[in-house]
Amino acid sequence: MKGKTLFWVVLFGALAALGAGIYLLHGPAVRSAAIYVDGALYRTVDLGAVAEPYSFTVETPDGWNTVQVSPGSIRVTDADCPHQDCVKQGAISDGAIPIVCLPHRLVIRIGEP
């Protein structure tokens, strides 16, 4: 019985290592960032096409946010909201957690192209 269990553990371990190797070789898909203001699409940024970092300001009726785009990531670097949670969050490079500025109704999400 121990031999059978060891066989399955080794087999699944090898398959997991193979999958991880393929993922690392090919890397994640190039993603784009969608910026929404009050639920409406404001701008889309192709993060895979960014060669040099650049910034722009998103002005809303409730205030402004300065957004910095870098190769593969995006962040809010400055805002005139009181708590600065969007600035403190830092850069994002995957779709796990969006950047949200509630006072300005700004949301930045990363997704597949």
Image (spheres, helix red, strand yellow):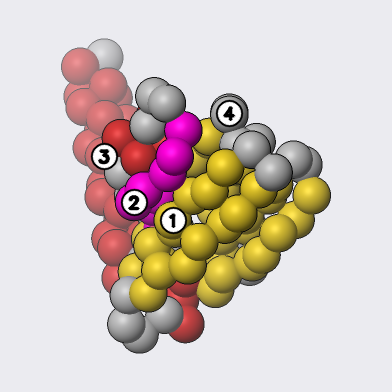
Instruction: Check if mark 3's residue and mark 1's residue have beta carbons within 8 Å.
Output: no
Magenta residues, start to end: 74-81
Crowding at mark 3 (Cα within 10 Å: few <14, some 14-19, many 20+): few
- What residue is pinned by disc 2? 77
Q: Residue at x 36, y 48 (%)?
A: 78
Quarter of the image with the C terminus in it: bottom right
Q: Nearer the viewer, residue 28 or 63?
A: 63
Q: CA distance from mark 3 to mark 1?
A: 45 Å
Q: Which mark is residue 13?
A: 3
First along the sequence among labels 3 and 1: 3
- In the rendered image, the vertical position of residue 113 relative to residue 4, given as above or below: below
Q: CA distance from mark 4 to mark 3?
A: 44 Å
- What residue is pinned by disc 4? 102
Q: Which mark is residue 66?
A: 1
Q: Quadrant of residue 4?
A: top left
Q: Say what amino acid the circle numbered 3 marks.
A: Gly
